[in-house]
Image: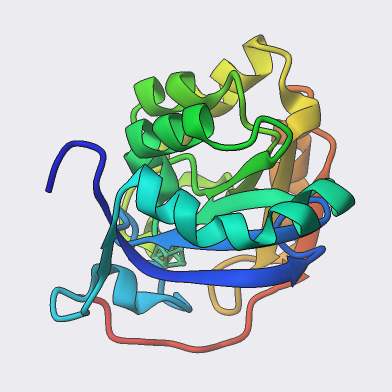
Amino acid sequence: MTCTEAKFIGVNRHRIGRDGDGVTTLACFYGCPLRCHYCLNPQCFDSNYKCRVLTPETLLAEVMIDDLYFQATGGGVTFGGGEPCLQSRFIEEFRRISNPVWKINIETSLNVATEHIERVAGFVHQFIIDIKDMDESVYKAYTSVDNERILENLRYLSQLGLQDKCRIRLPLIPDYNTHGHIETSKKMLAGLGFSDFDVFEYKRRKRAVR
Ligand code: SF4
């Protein structure tokens, strides 16, 4: 693959109110550094999964069919996964060649090196941040990795004053956290100026962690 090709597990059209404003197309990258116990997209790290390989240009040609929907509803393209921020160069190039009125959103765990967030922060319309839980031990138990980089990236977004562009998902995770943990996470995040929280409950769907 060239440096701006990337693997995708799917491209889904006509999503409304789920991944950003207006009508959106959700483009999901292959690859994720986390191993969440209730992951709904385990194909993201299944080495046998038959991914699609796209360039920014071929993805643009595919999503262009909804240009009028995007323009009429204030929608655009949302990148998910897996972890889309690992493909920040691809997203940067897609932004450069796509219709500038389209909104570009990112669904991310923020558990990536800050250089990736720096690359996209200037043009992302909304970061939909799946934070899991701010408690280090809850996070590690649920995802199998630590959350140090998340705090660093939250501070970075906060310093840029981009809190209004961030919606933070705070799930109740059966067997892993409690409503008390969620309240504590909210207080920590509010201390950094974040205020748009989406609290909900994960469905229990345990899988074997690889
Ligand atoms: S962040 Fe967790 S839930 Fe999302 S794709 Fe990765 S492992 Fe699955």
- Check the picture and name the quadrant holding the C terminus: bottom left
Using the rendered view, name the quadrant where residue 91 is placed.
top left
Instruction: State the residue at coordinates (14%, 81%).
Output: 48
Can residue 149 be seen in this snapshot? no
State whether residue 99 is above or below residue 170.
above
Considering depth in this image, is 92 or 82 the residue closer to the camera?
Answer: 92
Instruction: Point out residue 60 in the picture as x, y percentages from the top left corner.
Output: 48, 50
- Image position of 124 (left or right of 141): right
Can residue 23 be seen in this snapshot? yes
Considering depth in this image, is 149 or 107 the residue closer to the camera?
Answer: 107
Instruction: State the residue at coordinates (61%, 21%).
Output: 157
Q: Quadrant of ligand 1?
A: bottom left
Instruction: Point out residue 34 in the picture as x, y percentages from the top left corner.
Output: 34, 58
Callout count: 0
Using the rendered view, name the quadrant where residue 195 is placed.
top right
Considering depth in this image, is 92 or 49 the residue closer to the camera?
Answer: 92
Instruction: State the residue at coordinates (49%, 27%).
Output: 96
- Image position of 107 (left or right of 187): left
Q: How is the image coloured?
A: rainbow
- Image position of 70 (left or right of 80): right
- Image position of 74 (left or right of 96): right
State whether residue 169 is above or below residue 14.
above
Instruction: State the residue at coordinates (63%, 44%).
Output: 105
State whether residue 41 is above or below residue 152.
below
Instruction: Point out residue 5 in the picture as x, y percentages from the top left corner.
Output: 24, 47
Considering depth in this image, is 6 or 184 the residue closer to the camera?
Answer: 6
Instruction: Point out residue 25 in the picture as x, y percentages from the top left corner.
Output: 62, 61
